[in-house]
């Protein structure tokens, strides 16, 4: 373990586009179902529904939060609908599975999705790799990057932020983690193109290959 990470006792990972490559475009399937859901609930056409969906994501952190605030949708119904997708595009990355298993300390998932969506982890061969999934329900529907979601995660999982690392593909979701004292890893795999994010002071580490990065930090000094 490299010296800069020797203090880490809790390894916290986002799920979508972090524990699998953004190139799989699994979220593209979810995105289309979200647009269809928004269209049905609002009566808007596909293009207008897509614009509303993205505005809710930008302003509320998730489309779900916007739909709850403005249309009173049931979160369980919404998530069950948008996650009713096939998982064929996902496959196990043995290198990543083995690297996560070798990490010393605790391993957890912190996601704006819900724990029922943990079937993604099964498809990735990671269902036994994590002790807990802190999901949108556990966050009382205050998603990343709202600071309240991080506070609820740390409290529920009894994590000391000064001894934790958070890995996430959405660079903006790392800012609150860094403010709380966590080490941060940006999984820069193309799911978020933010020009200034690479130099942002809230990003400690950056990689386009999570499995390779974990192997590298585990291999140094051994």
Image: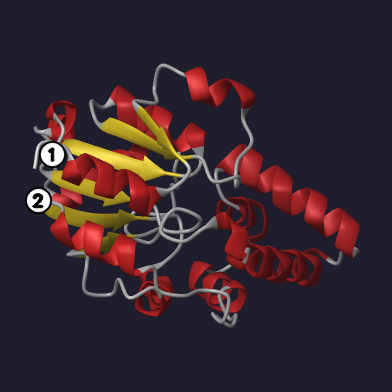
In the depicted view, which residue is nearer to us: 164 or 39? 164
Residue 184 lies in what quarter of the image? Answer: top left
The numbered mark, 2 or 1, whose residue comes first in the sequence reads: 1
Which residue is pictured at 12% across the width and 54% down the height?
106
Numbered label attached to residue 1:
1
Residue 161 lies left or right of residue 115; in this view the side is: left
Q: In this view, does 130 lie to the left or right of 1?
A: right
Q: Where is residue 176 in the image (x, y as percent from the top left)?
A: 37, 30
Percent coordinates x, y for residue 168 in the rendering: 42, 44
Q: Which residue is drawn at 60% across and 77% down?
A: 81
138 horizontally vs 131: left or right: right
Instruction: Work out how far the residue at label 2 is from the one at label 1, CA to CA, in angstroms.
Output: 9 Å
Packing grade of label 1 (10 A; few <14, some 14-19, many >=20) is: some
For this view, does 178 lie left or right of residue 4? Answer: right
Please report the residue visible at 26 percent of the width from the left and 49 percent of the height from the top.
Answer: 215
Disc 2 to disc 1: CB gap under 8 Å: yes
Can residue 149 be seen at all in this image of the molecule?
Answer: no
Residue 14 position, x and y percent, is 39, 52
Density class for disc 2 (Cα within 10 Å; few <14, some 14-19, many ≥20) is: some
Q: Which mark is residue 104?
A: 2
User: Which type of secondary structure does the marked residue at label 1 adopt?
Assistant: loop
Which callout, 2 or 1, points to the residue nearer the camera?
Answer: 1
Q: Which quadrant is the C terminus positioned in?
A: top left
What is the quadrant of the N terminus in the image?
top left
Query: Could you say whether the residue bearing mark 2 is in a helix, strand or loop?
Result: loop
Please tell me in which quadrant of the rendered image residue 77 appears: bottom right
Q: Which of 188 and 147 is in front in this view?
A: 188
Residue 186 seen by the camera: yes
Measured from the top left, where is residue 107 in percent x and y? 19, 56
């Amino acid at each position: 373990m490299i010296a800069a990470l020797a203090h880490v006792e809790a390894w916290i990972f986002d799920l979508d586009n972090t524990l699998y490559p953004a190139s799989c475009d699994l979220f593209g399937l979810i995105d289309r179902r979200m647009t269809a859901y928004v269209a049905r609930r609002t009566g808007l056409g596909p293009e207008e529904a897509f614009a509303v969906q993205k505005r809710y994501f930008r302003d509320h952190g998730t489309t779900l939060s916007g739909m709850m605030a403005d249309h009173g949708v049931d979160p369980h119904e919404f998530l069950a609908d948008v996650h009713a997708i096939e998982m064929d595009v996902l496959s196990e990355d043995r290198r990543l599975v083995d690297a996560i298993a070798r990490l010393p300390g605790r391993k957890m998932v912190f996601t704006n999705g819900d724990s029922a969506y943990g079937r993604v982890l099964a498809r990735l061969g990671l269902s036994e790799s994590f002790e807990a999934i802190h999901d949108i329900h556990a966050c009382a529907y205050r998603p990343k990057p709202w600071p309240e979601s991080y506070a609820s995660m740390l409290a529920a999982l009894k994590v000391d932020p000064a001894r934790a690392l958070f890995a996430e593909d959405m660079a903006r979701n790392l800012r609150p983690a860094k403010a709380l004292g966590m080490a941060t890893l940006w999984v820069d795999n193309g799911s978020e193109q933010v020009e200034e994010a690479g130099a942002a002071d809230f990003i400690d580490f950056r990689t386009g290959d999570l499995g390779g990065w974990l192997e590298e930090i585990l291999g140094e000094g051994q």
